[in-house]
Amino acid sequence: MRKQFHDIIPGSSIHEVYQDSEKQYQEADRLLNETRDTLLSQLVKETDDH
């Protein structure tokens, strides 16, 4: 594994580590947004049903 916190935090990793990290952070952000949107739509639906 190339992505180690002790290399990323001080900025001493190789360039590819930052490219990989960016992709992983984008995917995590996408999943979080998708989950949030799903949960919010369920809450709205439940509110509208009552």
Image: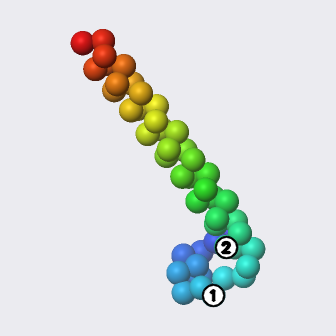
Amino acid under label 1? Ser
**Mark 2 closeness class: few <14, some 14–19, many ≥20 residues within 10 Å:** some
At mark 2, the secondary structure is: helix
- 38 or 18: nearer the viewer: 38
User: Could you tell me how many numbered marks the image carries?
Assistant: 2
- Nearest the eye: 17 or 40: 40
Quadrant including the C terminus = top left
Q: CA distance from mark 1 to mark 2?
A: 10 Å
Residue that lies at the very extreme toward the left in this rendered image: 50
Residue labelled with disc 2: 18
State the residue position of label 1.
12
Give the residue displayed 39% in from the left and 24% down from the top.
42
- Residue appearing at x 59%, y 85% in the figure: 11
Is the residue 28 above or below the residue 46 in the image? below
- Across and down, in percent, residue 3 comes to 64, 71
Is 46 or 12 nearer to us in this picture? Answer: 46
Other-residue count near label 1 (Cα within 10 Å), few / some / many at <14 / 14–19 / ≥20 = few
* Disc 1, SS: loop
Left/right of residue 13 with respect to residue 43 in the rendered view: right
Snapshot quadrant of residue 7: bottom right
Compared to residue 21, the image places residue 11 above or below, namely below
In the rendered image, residue 31, in percent from the top left (x then y), is placed at 55, 44
Q: In percent of the image, x 54 and y 52: which residue is there?
A: 29
Q: Which mark is residue 23?
A: none
Give left or right: position of 25 versus 50: right
> Which is more N-terminal, label 2 or label 1?
1
Q: Where residue 32 sits in the image (x, y, percent)? A: 49, 46
Identified at 43% across, 39% down, the residue is: 36
Q: Quadrant of the N terminus?
A: bottom right
Instruction: Tell me where residue 22 sits by quadrant.
Output: bottom right
From this viewpoint, which residue is outermost toward the top? 49
Amino acid marked by disc 2: Tyr
